[in-house]
């Protein structure tokens, strides 16, 4: 019996190593190709190690603009979504009004709607407002889908805080805005981190609205990577841009790792 358990432990270790290799192998291959010349260049042979792929990112104005646009999407998205979602989540958590549960479910139902379904009405609305083909227009479209999930996340964290804390603060003379700013936000900072993380993920990789609502300006990095593919694709450059596009997400995960690890355990605020 001990021998069987020992074999089971070995099988588990082997299976875990095989899974890790399966997950990491594409990333390793992408990283290696990013530092290799895949097309012949002046003074550079195919297969030669080089940093030219990364310097090509800085030399290409379209790629620089795409990175800037994606960063702008994320910043605008977070700066709009979180301040709007926080009081909304507080209202759903602490207040009762007619149709509150139905409205909350409607927000969640809107979030699971495929973005492509809403591209035409959003395009028509944004055309009337004159914000098509602009960074702000794309970021605002992202907010429409990030706001429901942010409200849902923050509502869960606020509900985990005893309501007696609100009542005690009000007795001590705190107004509701002051209570939210001074007491509530520090208590749910992990939830805010999770909501901001989801805003980042959606805005950074979203392509549907970027394809429909942009023609010349405001193209994100995902669209720029797609534009690199052609008759003679420089795979090394594509891998370098892809690797560089993953860097902000990796840095965000590292910087917010403590808040995220705590925040994903909703209810343990």
Image (cartoon, rainbow, N blue to C red):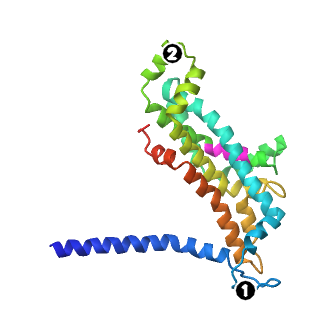
CA–CA distance between discs 1 and 2?
70 Å
Name the spot of residue 84 as percent of width and height, x first. Answer: 64, 34
Look at mark 2 in the image and give the residue it sits on: 170
**Nearer to us in this view, 229 or 52:** 52
219 within the magenta span: no
Count the marks. 2
First-in-chain label (1 vs 2): 1
Asked if residue 57 shows in the view, the reply is: yes
Q: Quadrant of residue 128?
A: top right
Name the spot of residue 40 as percent of width and height, x first. Answer: 78, 85
Judge left or right: residue 76 versus residue 93. right
**Nearer to us in this view, 186 or 143:** 186
Name the spot of residue 14 as percent of width and height, x first. Answer: 36, 75
**Nearer to us in this view, 116 or 37:** 37
As helix, strand or loop, the secondary structure at mark 1 comes to: loop
Look at mark 1 in the image and give the residue it sits on: 46
Q: Quadrant of residue 1?
A: bottom left
Most common SS among magenta residues: helix
How many residues crowd around disc 2 within 10 Å: few (fewer than 14), some, or many (20 or more)? some
Q: Which residues are magenta?
A: 139-146
The quadrant of the rendering that contains the C terminus is: top left
Q: Quadrant of residue 61?
A: bottom right
| On screen, residue 71 above or below 9 | above
Judge left or right: residue 74 versus residue 136. left
Name the spot of residue 33 as percent of width and height, x first. Answer: 65, 77
């Amino acid at each position: 019996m001990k021998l069987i358990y020992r074999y089971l432990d070995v099988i588990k270790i082997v299976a875990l190593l095989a899974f890790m290799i399966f997950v990491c192998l594409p990333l390793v291959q992408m990283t290696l190709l990013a530092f290799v010349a895949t097309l012949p260049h002046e003074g550079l042979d195919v297969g030669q190690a080089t940093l030219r792929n990364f310097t090509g990112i800085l030399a290409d104005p379209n790629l620089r603009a795409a990175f800037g646009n994606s960063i702008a999407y994320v910043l605008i998205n977070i700066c709009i979504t979180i301040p709007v979602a926080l009081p909304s989540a507080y209202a759903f958590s602490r207040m009762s009004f007619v149709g509150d549960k139905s409205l909350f479910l409607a927000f969640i139902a809107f979030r699971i709607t495929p973005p492509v379904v809403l591209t035409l009405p959003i395009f028509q609305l944004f055309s009337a407002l004159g914000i098509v083909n602009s960074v702000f227009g794309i970021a605002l479209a992202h907010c429409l889908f990030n706001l429901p999930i942010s409200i849902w996340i923050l509502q869960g964290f606020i509900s985990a805080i005893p309501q007696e804390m609100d009542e005690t603060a009000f007795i001590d003379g705190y107004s509701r805005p002051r209570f939210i700013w001074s007491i509530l936000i520090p208590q749910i900072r992990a939830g805010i981190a999770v909501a901001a993380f989801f805003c980042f993920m959606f805005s950074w990789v979203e392509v549907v609205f970027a394809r429909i609502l942009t023609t010349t300006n405001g193209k994100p990095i995902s669209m720029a990577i797609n534009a690199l593919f052609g008759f003679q694709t420089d795979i090394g450059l594509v891998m370098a841009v892809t690797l560089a596009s993953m860097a902000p997400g990796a840095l965000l995960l590292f910087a917010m790792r403590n808040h995220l690890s705590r925040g994903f355990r909703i209810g343990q605020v």
